[in-house]
């Protein structure tokens, strides 16, 4: 059998997905047996120009991590789509926008204003801002323009498969790679992960009927070691987040923050989580309910922590600075 | 005027880009290092619950998330005015030491090793980790891979996750260390010390015993006289997790020693219109442009800077190596940028020894891992040493305990001015009128900035010793006259 041709690329991301790809350890040798990596700016030497020269659909599969937030990201997404038979959104940034997607609560102007003028240590008496074109004594320098809105890969080009996680856990990464190597792929559009239901099904904590009189912040209480964190009033996202990760966070006594995205069949993780949390409030008194809800101090930023760009909300209304 | 563009070199919130302008006679007029991307963490942290900062800010960088996690957690301690328990502090520092072992190992062997182990003139095809393993032998090569794997295991066991750990809380940590895990950590720590010893020996055999390398370390092309910054303990010894920030001047004299709350009196950030990065400088000296010397506020925050800014190391084997380095290189401070690689290995030894001390500390498996804050969060500053420089997180909370203001001075950002200066100097040394621009231009420019281990998302994510570099030379009419790439 001919070896697969695989490409890996990052757009706007933190590099954690690159480290996660390496975390498969010695299995990387199995990958090397089955596939030739034709493009991976992190690890091998190939240029954008080399990709441009490839015939269309000559890459068998491309794992694309990172969100889309400037012209270069968008250009590479389109180019790799054109050259690849299978395009995989790998990791939360590409799948749903992830934490950098929280920038959609603001916009490019507000972000620039804060970064270059308002932050405490900035010393900028003449109010200089980075510019798309700057004339320096020796010539001209260019910078890409920052988009107002962070986009997911699927909001930019057609995506064949999704691999969730910030970053994907080792076993999730290997499941995706193994599916590619064996050709045993699910229907197009699927999320490749071990579980379609919630993190709760991975979590060894004991669960009862959930009834909450107050939400606590993680620093306020020491949770019981074996009981569901949400039952103890900690805002755990596990109930509305796809499992398959093995629930490492609740096992470290910290609530799930939702990085594996929505459970199968749910379009919008954030609104699903908000309704799940609301449904466990143990009161019928509107005043008491409001008081309990006040315990959720950043509902949008917590429920949409990883999914704001992909959500129905998508972004906050653009205010000019 | 001709223009050379190197794009992309690596990442700092995106790809870095070098543009070199040549005079009409072919000599270097100026050089710019641009950072073409901004994600805006300081802005979108506003409105988030303060306690989520350790997990949010670590998404700045998936290579050194532990550094952001730790700086944020310490800023939370400060905001809530809550002292972590003694066991919790030790658990945090234990994880942090394991993290330094993995990070410094990755940098020395996988990123920088190729420069020294293979030699700067080795064929490009060999200048990568595979070439390094072929030269140092499979045995040591295997140890490199195993060291990374084992220390990542520690991070997972102690911090909850291998990448983006979750254990940091104001006043403590979320998870105890079991005796079973402690035993395993101790074994790994012993192997780390041995690995650090072998690495220093390798550096001695391959680099220090080779006059050509030593001459290169001592050469003017790779020298800048700047201020140096690093965190020190109460005895002015290097510390990664806690202490005061000490700055020494280019003569090695203490310029200032400040506690986290005083950082704004000491550090300011300059803005240029041609880059998305800011350029931190010493406020009391002032921004004088991209120049070195005592009158310029440019400082460096690297492994070498930390050793320069301290009076010694807190563990015995690292201290021995510290003394050896400074006596070999003519005393403190050392201005030779390439000596940063040596300093990094001395820090690897310190991290390994410190991990072993903590793994054998009776308190480390103790049950008392959290103090519960009683005050409301207000304002806090947390400072740690990230592998690539002093990392400062500063938050102000609103009345509900959400972030109102956030200011971050990140590892590599400290070094942005010095990085540009180093690139320019190497270019000036290499590109001369009438001299052919050759492949070695790429190597030397890489070598000029690699000691900083510039994390362009906070570290280079490039695994082998080669970066995807492209140099395009334009003539004064804008036509491409030469293209080099690899």
Image: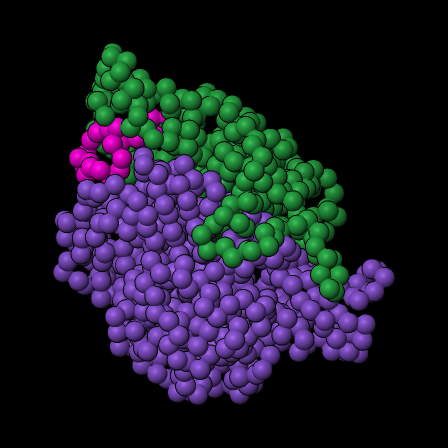
* Numbered range of the magenta stretch: A215-242
- The percent coordinates of residue A221 (x first, y second) are 20, 37
Q: Is residue B243 above or below residue B180?
A: below
Q: Is residue A32 above or below residue A168?
A: below
Q: Quadrant of the N terminus of chain A?
A: top right
Residue in view at x 30 percent, y 44 percent: B378
- The percent coordinates of residue A84 (x first, y second) are 65, 39
The green-coloured chain is labelled A
Residue in view at x 27 percent, y 50 percent: B77
Q: In the figure, is residue B195 to the left or right of A15?
A: left
Q: In the figure, is residue B368 to the left or right of B226?
A: left
Q: A304 or B99: which is nearer to us?
A: A304
Residue B286 visible in the picture: yes
Quadrant of residue A235 within the rendered picture: top left
Q: A95 or B86: which is nearer to us?
A: B86
Q: Is residue A128 above or below residue B166?
A: below
Quadrant of residue B2 within the rendered picture: bottom right
- The percent coordinates of residue B16 (x first, y second) are 60, 57
Q: In the figure, is residue B74 to the left or right of A48?
A: left
Q: Quadrant of the C terminus of chain A?
A: top right
């Amino acid at each position: 059998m001919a070896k697969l041709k695989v490409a890996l690329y990052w757009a706007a991301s933190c590099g954690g997905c690159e480290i996660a790809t390496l975390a498969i350890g010695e299995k990387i040798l199995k990958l090397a047996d089955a596939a030739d990596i034709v493009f991976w700016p992190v690890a091998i030497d190939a240029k954008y120009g080399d990709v441009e020269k490839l015939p269309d659909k000559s890459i068998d599969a491309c794992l694309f991590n990172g969100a889309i937030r400037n012209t270069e990201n968008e250009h590479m997404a389109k180019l790799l789509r054109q050259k690849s038979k299978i395009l995989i959104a790998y990791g939360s940034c590409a799948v749903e926008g992830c934490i950098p997607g929280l920038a959609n609560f603001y916009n490019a102007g507000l972000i620039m204003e804060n970064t270059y003028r308002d932050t405490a240590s900035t010393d900028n008496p003449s109010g200089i801002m980075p510019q798309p074109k700057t004339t320096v004594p020796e010539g001209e320098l260019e910078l890409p323009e920052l988009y107002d809105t962070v986009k997911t890969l699927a909001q930019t080009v057609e995506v064949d498969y999704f691999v969730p996680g910030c970053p994907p856990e080792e076993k999730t990464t290997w499941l995706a790679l193994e599916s590619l190597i064996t050709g045993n792929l699910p229907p197009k559009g699927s999320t490749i992960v071990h579980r379609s239901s919630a993190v709760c099904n991975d979590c060894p904590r004991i669960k009862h009927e959930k009834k909450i009189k107050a939400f606590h912040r993680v620093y306020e209480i020491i949770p019981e070691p074996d009981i569901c964190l949400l039952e103890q009033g900690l805002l755990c996202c596990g109930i509305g987040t796809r499992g398959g990760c093995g629930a490492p966070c609740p096992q470290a006594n910290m609530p799930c923050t939702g990085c594996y995205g929505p459970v199968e069949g749910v379009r919008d993780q954030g609104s699903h989580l908000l309704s799940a949390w609301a449904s466990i409030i143990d009161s019928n008194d509107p005043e008491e309910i409001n008081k309990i809800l006040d315990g959720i101090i950043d509902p949008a930023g917590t429920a949409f922590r990883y999914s704001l760009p992909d959500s129905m909300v998508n972004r906050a209304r653009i205010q000019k600075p | 005027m001709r223009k050379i563009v190197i794009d992309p070199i690596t990442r700092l919130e995106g790809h870095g880009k070098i543009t070199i302008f040549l005079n009409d006679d072919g000599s270097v007029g100026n050089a710019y290092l641009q950072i073409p991307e901004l994600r805006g963490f300081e802005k979108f942290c506003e409105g988030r619950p303060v306690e989520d900062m350790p997990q949010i800010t670590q998404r700045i960088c998936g290579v050194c998330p532990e550094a952001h996690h730790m700086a944020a957690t310490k800023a939370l301690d400060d905001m809530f005015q809550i002292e972590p328990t003694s066991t919790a502090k030790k658990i945090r520092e234990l994880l942090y030491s394991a993290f330094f072992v993995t990070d410094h190992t990755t940098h020395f062997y996988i990123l920088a090793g190729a420069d020294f182990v293979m030699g700067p003139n080795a064929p490009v095809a060999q200048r990568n980790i595979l070439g390094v393993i072929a030269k140092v032998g499979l045995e040591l090569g295997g140890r490199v891979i195993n060291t990374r794997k084992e220390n990542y295991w520690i991070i997972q066991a102690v911090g909850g996750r291998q990448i983006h750990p979750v254990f940091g809380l104001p006043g403590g940590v979320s998870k105890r260390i079991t005796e079973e895990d402690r035993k395993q950590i101790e074994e790994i720590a012993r192997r780390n010390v041995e690995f650090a010893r072998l690495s220093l020996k390798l550096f001695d055999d391959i680099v220090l015993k080779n006059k050509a390398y030593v001459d290169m370390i001592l050469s003017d092309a790779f020298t800048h006289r700047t201020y140096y910054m690093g965190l020190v303990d109460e005895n002015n010894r290097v510390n990664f997790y806690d202490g005061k920030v000490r700055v020494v001047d280019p003569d090695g004299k203490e310029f200032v020693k400040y506690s986290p709350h005083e950082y704004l009196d000491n550090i300011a950030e300059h803005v240029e219109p041609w880059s998305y990065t800011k350029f931190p400088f010493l406020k009391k000296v002032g921004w004088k442009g991209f120049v070195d010397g005592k009158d310029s506020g440019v400082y460096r925050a690297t492994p070498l800077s930390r050793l320069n800014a301290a009076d010694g190391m807190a563990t015995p084997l690292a201290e021995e190596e510290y003394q050896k380095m400074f006596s070999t290189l003519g005393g403190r401070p050392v201005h030779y940028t390439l000596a940063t690689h040596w300093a990094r290995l001395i820090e690897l030894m310190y991290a390994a020894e410190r991990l072993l001390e903590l793994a054998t500390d009776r308190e480390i498996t103790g049950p008392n891992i959290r103090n519960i804050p009683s005050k409301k969060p207000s304002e806090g500053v947390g400072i740690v040493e990230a592998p690539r420089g002093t990392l400062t997180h500063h938050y102000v909370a609103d009345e509900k305990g959400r972030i109102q203001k956030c200011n971050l001075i990140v590892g590599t950002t400290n070094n942005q001015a010095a990085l540009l200066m180093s690139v320019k100097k190497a270019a000036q040394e290499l590109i001369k009128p009438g001299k052919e621009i050759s492949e070695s231009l790429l190597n030397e420019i890489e070598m000029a900035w690699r000691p900083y281990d510039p994390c362009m998302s906070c570290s280079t994510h490039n695994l082998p010793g080669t970066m995807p570099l492209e140099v395009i030379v334009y003539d004064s009419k804008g036509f491409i006259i030469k293209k080099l790439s690899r």
